[in-house]
Amino acid sequence: MKEKDILKKAYGMPLSSPSYSKGPYRFVDREYLIITYKTDMDALREVVPEPLEIKEPLVKYEFIRMPDSMGFGDYTESGQVIPITYRGKSGGYVHSMYLDCESPISGGREIWGFPKKLAYPTLKVEKDTLIGTLDYGSIRVATGTMGYKYKELNKNAILKSMKEPQFLIKIIPDVNGKLKICQLVKYAATNIKIKGAWSGPAQLELHPHALAPVADLPILEIVSASHFVSDLTLGYGSVVHDYLKKK
């Protein structure tokens, strides 16, 4: 293969058969259970990177079903997003993500830097209850429950929150093991359509695990819960801070 052919063909790993397709990526009927809770402020300070700022000791624990995802297929995800501000504007810092499909793990990490790890999340309805779970191997590390569609939520309020920028740290080592890329990345969803949104009584349990440390941000109080279904497009991101750039 000639060098020009390599550069023409290459966009992801491995070269011969990339783990994911080219974007942008469209999601249809993406279903969320988000339980917001108060946590320890010192614990948040330990994990939220500068130059992001924390205003309140809150965490959004998410369970997400993605049955129709362009290039990624059908999978489920679970993790924590921390409300932050960046240059005075509200957003979210993606702290942890656990999912059950290799393609979005590879694509998410390589393109944006999503903190994705292989695990076994679920989101389903049992009788009158919406239930989200996360297992790491055979160990249950998170369980969220909410009364199913108790009260309709304002779709515009959900849409506004969905449009807020999200931030994460993209880390890629060099072949010698040293850091090659260490960047604060911003991205946002576009072409969002909220198909339905509801709230209800909710509870959340987090259990300690060495390799899935969601319980390191402890639950002090449940603040709110939301359940909604949406279509959206996940576009590419932008670098807002380079930690390796010499000042």
Image (cartoon, rainbow, N blue to C red):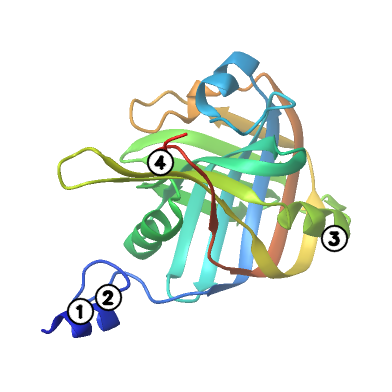
For the point 78% across and 64% down, the residue is: 196
80 left or right of 121 in image: right
Task: Report the Cα–Cα distance between label 2 and label 4.
Answer: 35 Å
What's under tag 3, amino acid-wise? Lys
What's under tag 2, amino acid-wise? Ala
Q: Mark 2 or mark 3, which is nearer to you?
A: 2
Residue 10's tag is 2
Q: Position of residue 243 (x, y in %)?
A: 44, 37
Judging depth in this view, the residue of 139 and 79 nearest the camera is 79
Q: Mark 4 or mark 3, which is nearer to you?
A: 3
Are the residues flagged by discs 1 and 2 in contact, CB closer than 8 Å? yes
What's under tag 4, amino acid-wise? Asp
Secondary structure state at the residue bearing disc 4: strand
Q: Position of residue 247 (x, y in %)?
A: 47, 34
Task: Report the Cα–Cα distance between label 4 and label 3.
Answer: 31 Å
From this viewpoint, is residue 122 visible?
A: yes
Residue 6's tag is 1
Task: Report the Cα–Cα distance between label 2 and label 3.
Answer: 40 Å
Q: Which residue is mark 4?
A: 135
